[in-house]
Image: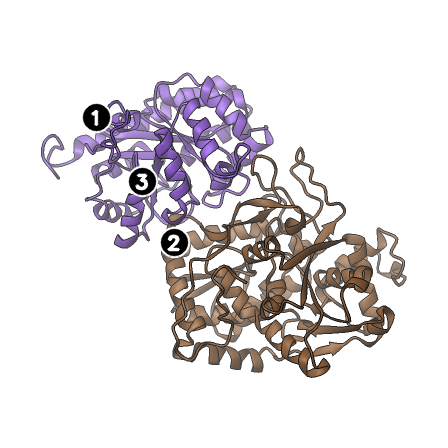
Chain colours: A brown, B purple
């Protein structure tokens, strides 16, 4: 369904030449970056074609070996017994929380750090919101012996301290970004500035299916292993394709990863669950959207290298997004998702902060899985709309929630969450 | 001096193109300020002071919330201007109100150009800019690959699209850039983001040499903060110098120190004079003399 109809995937193609294309998904995508970066982007596009699409020098074989041995793939597709009983439907969880590092992010980080190594780059930089991508990149960089610097917003550093520690423990430098509201948007801008300064020896590991071409396609290809496995596992378990796949969407990397191999399966409904935050409205006067629902409520524009759907005001100034989950707190979304939504292939939906917190507690109590707050959005959507999802649903549990415990204590104690345990002993933090 | 490559298009841009004229008699001094920093009225006075101080072209920054090519000095200026209420509509009012006699170039990011007016695409913005008195655009996040629609709108309304050439730009890319460029070429003196620096990159000479066959004036920017640096760069062959952060610093200091607008404007004018004089000195130092002989 992508504009070029290619289905390159993560398999390599046995030497058959596959081109990266022009980076456009219908009206979306492109390469809106400073000229200084364009030669590096041309070099990366060439490397993406050679190594990822055409498996030159056995790159994809090495990636597959490392993501299996170091990463712990394949991750299970687990039947969620109590949720299945509760909703009177078959619920399967794709357990990306069990991947090394605790989130799907390692698929992409390992792929890109390895690619940087094949390209002869000497330094890795990355941005991070919730810290999961930063952690995955720090781990991949340590694993492959590359120096790494991660940019993270001040506000996110305060919300996600465990991941800051993990990055440092793995030997990465964590640089605090204090501009704007100190979240993912500012961290991306600051990482692009570093890249523009050090572009000759540095690779920027973008953490989602966003940014200039070839990043949206390349990151999708590294993440497509999620749906490749889930599709096979679902057929093996149930004898058929699922009726629906549900995944949360911030930038959209776990979403595209969970959807990619199902896009051609017309019988499978694809739901991208965005952060509805506290409201879907945008306050143009204040330059604030109390949500991160750019697929549901955004409009077309150009940010961080791509034309896509954005949260912006009438003039085109980017507004500040909000979500209880740092990992979804971004004003843009991947251009391919924007395209698939326009084409009617992906349905954008959203749940609010309250429902996400409830979803977090529900999965923790009923299935013994503590989900990331990002994934809790997908589980909250399942809870609210299970009757519309068909008989068999796959929910992508994109990450585990250990990193979110401080946020969950704070957010649970300041609102009335019906299914939460008594958190009073944790007031004041962990 | 180089003629506007689009000057033979048969339109009224050929004769009396103010941007081409600005580079016609010796080195051009091209200052930049973020419009609306720290407020609308002061900003008017500051831009007029730069014209008084000898500016040949002025780059007016229309603030965008995500200025990915800017260092901290201009990021902060943009934040102050947005905080004080600068918008594309106010920007055009500003341009119309300005009392200066030099060509004005709008420097901004593509999303603001793309969103203006009721239809998406660059045309409404370019049409408005032309009627307000803008002569051209610098758009840092628009490489040649994505510049087609804006180039087309610029051609329709007789405006220039000024491309940035980076130290990493090779011969192949240079061809693509020249294809969409007019007015002058903005030669980025070093890698990285905008910001004043204490030394001039030795990559400037390399970049200028690479551009020697390009039939457009070459204005060098990124890191220039003193008359001596301006002289060095012009001596190395630049047709102009672009100075942003060093001037924005003066605005920031004045704002933080609570200085009256006139005092800050006076310092901007004095600094503009120093930079312009530096450029002229550098031109004089070229050997052999630039008149009539090629160096």
User: How many neighbours does mark 1 have within 10 angstroms: few (below 14), some (14-19), or many (20 or more)?
Assistant: few
Q: Position of residue A183 (x, y in %)?
A: 62, 50
- Which of the chains bears the disc numbered 1? B
Instruction: Report helix, strand or loop for mark 1.
Output: loop
Residues at marks 1 and 2 on the same chain: no
Q: Nearer the viewer, mark 3 or mark 2?
A: 3
- Which of the chains bears the disc numbered 3? B
Nearest the viewer among A340 and B97 is: A340
* Location of residue B52 (image quadrant): top left
Instruction: Report helix, strand or loop for mark 2.
Output: helix
Where the N terminus of chain B falls, by quadrant?
A: top left
Q: Position of residue A367 (x, y in %)?
A: 81, 73
Residue A173's disc is: none
Residue A38's disc is: 2
Residues at marks 3 and 2 on the same chain: no
- Which of the chains bears the disc numbered 2? A
* Location of residue B224 (image quadrant): top left
Marks 3 and 1, Cα distance to the nearest angstrom?
A: 21 Å
Marks 3 and 2, Cα distance to the nearest angstrom?
A: 16 Å
Q: Which residue is mark 3?
A: B181
Query: Which residue is at 38% across, 43% downward?
Result: B148
Relative placement, left or right, of B87 versus B282 is right
**Are discs 1 and 2 less than 8 Å apart at CB?**
no
Query: Which residue is at 68% across, 43% downward?
Result: A289
Query: Which residue is at 25% across, 25% downward?
Result: B21
Q: Position of residue B9 (x, y in %)?
A: 25, 32
Residue B25's disc is: 1
Mark found first going from the N terminus, 3 or 1: 1
**Are discs 3 and 1 less than 8 Å apart at CB?**
no
Decide if residue A170 is in sight here. Answer: no
């Amino acid at each position: 369904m992508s504009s070029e109809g290619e289905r390159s995937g993560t398999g390599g193609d046995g030497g058959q030449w596959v081109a990266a294309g022009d980076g456009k998904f219908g009206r979306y995508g492109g390469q809106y970056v400073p000229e200084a970066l364009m030669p590096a982007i041309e070099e990366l596009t060439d490397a993406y074609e050679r190594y990822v699409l055409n498996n030159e020098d056995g790159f994809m074989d090495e990636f597959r070996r490392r993501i299996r041995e170091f990463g712990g793939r394949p991750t299970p597709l687990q039947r969620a017994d109590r949720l299945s009983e509760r909703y009177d439907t078959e619920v399967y969880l794709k357990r990306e929380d069990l991947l090394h590092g605790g989130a799907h992010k390692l698929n992409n980080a390992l792929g890109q750090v390895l690619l940087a190594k094949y390209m002869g780059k000497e330094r890795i930089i990355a941005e991070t919101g919730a810290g999961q991508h930063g952690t995955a990149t720090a781990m991949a960089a340590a694993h492959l012996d590359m120096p790494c610097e991660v940019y993270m917003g001040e506000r996110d550093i305060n919300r996600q301290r465990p991941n800051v520690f993990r990055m440092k423990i793995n030997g990465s430098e964590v640089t605090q970004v204090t501009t704007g509201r100190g979240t993912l948007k500012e961290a991306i801008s600051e990482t692009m500035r570093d890249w523009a300064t050090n572009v000759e020896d540095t690779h920027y590991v973008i953490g989602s299916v966003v940014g200039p071409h070839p990043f949206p396609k390349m990151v999708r290809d590294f993440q497509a292993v999620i749906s490749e496995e889930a599709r096979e596992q679902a057929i093996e378990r149930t004898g058929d394709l699922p009726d629906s796949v549900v995944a949360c969407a911030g930038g959209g990397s776990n979403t595209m990863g969970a959807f990619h191999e199902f896009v051609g399966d017309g019988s499978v409904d694809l739901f991208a669950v965005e952060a509805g935050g506290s409201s879907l409205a945008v306050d143009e006067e204040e330059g604030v959207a109390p949500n991160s629902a750019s697929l549901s409520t955004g409009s077309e524009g150009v940010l961080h290298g791509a034309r896509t759907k954005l949260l912006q005001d009438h003039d085109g100034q980017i507004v500040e997004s909000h979500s209880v989950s740092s990992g979804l707190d971004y004003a843009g979304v991947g251009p391919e998702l924007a395209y698939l939504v326009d084409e009617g292939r992906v349905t954008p939906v959203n749940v609010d902060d309250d429902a996400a917190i409830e979803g977090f507690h529900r999965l923790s109590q009923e299935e013994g899985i503590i989900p990331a707050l990002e994934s809790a959005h997908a589980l909250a959507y399942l809870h609210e709309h299970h009757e519309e999802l068909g008989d068999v649903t796959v929910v992508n549990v994109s990450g585990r929630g250990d990193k979110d415990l401080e946020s969950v204590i704070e957010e649970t104690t300041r609102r009335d969450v019906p299914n939460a345990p008594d958190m009073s002993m944790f007031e004041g933090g962990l | 001096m180089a003629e506007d490559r689009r000057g033979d298009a048969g339109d009224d841009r050929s004769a009396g193109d103010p941007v081409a004229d600005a580079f016609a008699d010796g080195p051009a001094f091209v200052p930049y300020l973020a419009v609306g920093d720290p407020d609308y009225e002061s900003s008017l006075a500051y831009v007029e002071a730069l014209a008084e101080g000898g500016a040949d072209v002025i780059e007016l920054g229309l603030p965008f919330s995500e200025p990915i090519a800017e260092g901290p000095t201009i990021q902060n200026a943009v934040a102050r201007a947005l905080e004080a209420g600068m918008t594309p509509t106010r920007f055009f009012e500003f341009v119309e109100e300005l009392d200066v006699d030099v060509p004005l170039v709008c420097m901004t990011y593509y999303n603001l150009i793309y969103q203006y007016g009721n239809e998406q695409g660059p045309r409404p913005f370019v049409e408005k800019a032309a009627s307000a008195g803008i002569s051209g655009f610098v758009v840092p996040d628009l490489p040649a690959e994505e510049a087609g629609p804006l180039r087309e709108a610029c051609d329709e309304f007789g405006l220039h699209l000024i491309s940035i050439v980076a130290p990493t730009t090779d011969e192949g890319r240079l061809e693509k850039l020249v294809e969409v460029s007019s007015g002058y070429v903005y030669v980025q003196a070093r890698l990285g983001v905008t910001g004043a620096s204490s030394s001039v990159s030795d990559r400037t000479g390399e970049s200028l040499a690479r551009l020697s066959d390009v039939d457009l004036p070459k204005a060098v920017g990124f890191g220039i903060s003193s008359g001596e640096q301006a002289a060095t760069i012009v001596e190395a062959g630049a047709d102009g110098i672009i100075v942003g952060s060093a001037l924005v610093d003066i605005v920031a200091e004045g704002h933080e120190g609570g200085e009256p607008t006139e005092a800050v404007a006076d310092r901007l004018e004095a600094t503009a004079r120093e930079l312009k004089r530096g450029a002229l000195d550098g031109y004089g130092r070229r050997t052999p003399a630039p008149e009539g002989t090629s160096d």
